[in-house]
Amino acid sequence: MALDVSTEPHATANPVHEPAADLAARAAADGVRFLLALFVDLTGKPCAKLVPVEAADELQHEGVGFAGYAVGAIGQQPCDPDLIAIPDPASYTPLPWVREGLALVHCDPHVEGRPWPFAPRVILRQALAAAGALRLYAGAEVEYFLVSRGADGELAPADARDTAAQPCYDARGLTRMYDHLTEVSSAMNTLGWGNYANDHEDGNGQFEQNFAYADALTTADRVITARYLISVLAERRGMTATYMPKPFADRTGSGLHLHLSLWQDDTALFPAGGDGDSGSATFGLSALARSFLAGILDHAPGLQAVIAPTVNSYKRTGATATRSGATGPPTAATTAPTSSGCPTSTGSSCAGQTARPTRTWRWRSRWPPAWTASPVTWTPGRRAATPGRSCRRRCCTPSRPSPPTGWSAGCWTARGRASRSTSAPSSATSSWTGMAALAGGSWTAT
């Protein structure tokens, strides 16, 4: 996630999500014959009914019904009343690239006349309404893999030549997928989204396509539409577009980076200045921006249920390495460090995984300092160390060494890490050749 501290909205950004003309009139003007009335469940699955244009008025004013329990993750039981999807005409989007005469409209699920509180679009609407006069703008980076299934049933990059060890930004891989990428780009720009870049990402077969930011609801609708559009156009070429966080164990995973800015009227609220802040002392962020970040960090554990809802999500966050070596797993929220390496303004300490600094070092040792070759009992519930057993992660807890000179002693985490506070360990402790040898082990970058 990134905060936008610019002071002027992008020229193509929509200032507000405004109502549009009625669906029947829009469809007639565009030669549309069918409408996809669409919403997503809590995992992002697009659910829709195909509505003929002859029923557009009925769709707009009465909605269309769904058996909510069959939808999936949307908080309904078999005995619950039907979900009624009420379309938002402002989200009307013609999709001739998918099928001639097709358009899509995003819907807000209702139950018994009231917005359904477990529908993602309803949740976003309620959050934006609670912000009152504040307006949230959002930009999104849509990452995905293009894959195909071989004769053995295994998934592999759809481009068989995409085998480089470091494929990020590779012009050759980008060019081989030219037809797919440019069709998606042209569609985005025809719709007025402002596609400004398309690139090969860090994994083999991985791509990203970016478009201009807009108000948060518009951007959310466009992300869902883009993922649907990309998937359908990929299938037309015999490929599958997957947004799985970690489709390949040894390659970089996919995420959805968000760029956020908060406005009141025409005033940007995240840049430092207007509230007496000194930009140099606060990373260019206002007090409101820092509170915004602190709130996200404070709610980060609960947010995991929303932003990482599948088992595969944790295969990404739990990864230890990637094939390219250029991208690390997102194992912690990143915060602004002080000179000691600990986060600021969050009330946290370096005692927890989510609070650890961006740059950390890990102690590795075959035997913890002061241990003998004979069995030594660990803390309760842990195994006894025996000769030949290596020490990893928390097993070193009983006998952690002190950090080398020049390193912060107050930032040990549950895994025995320390953060650098000044410079490399001094020669009095050990020689410095990229890592410091100490007590039979080493400090290595992680």
Image (spheres, helix red, strand yellow):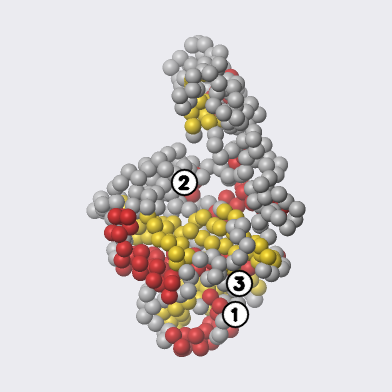
Residue drawn 44% across the image and 44% down it: 327
Is 386 drawn above or below residue 92 in the view shown?
above
Residue at the farthest left position: 151
> What is the C-alpha distance between the residues marked 2 and 1?
39 Å
Q: Which mark is residue 19?
A: 1
Q: What residue type is labelled 3?
A: Pro
In x, y percent, where is residue 279?
Answer: 67, 50
Say left or right for 243 vs 16: left
Residue drawn 35% across the image and 60% down it: 240
In x, y percent, where is residue 162?
Answer: 29, 51
In this figure, which residue is indicated by the disc labeled 3? 15
| Element under disc 1 | loop
Q: Do the residues labelled 1 and 3 touch (CB within 8 Å)?
A: no
Q: What residue type is labelled 2?
A: Arg
Q: Residue 316 carries which label?
A: 2
Residue drawn 37% across the image and 52% down it: 169
Q: Which amino acid does label 1 sit on?
A: Pro
- Is residue 91 visible to us here? yes
- Is residue 53 visible to us here? no
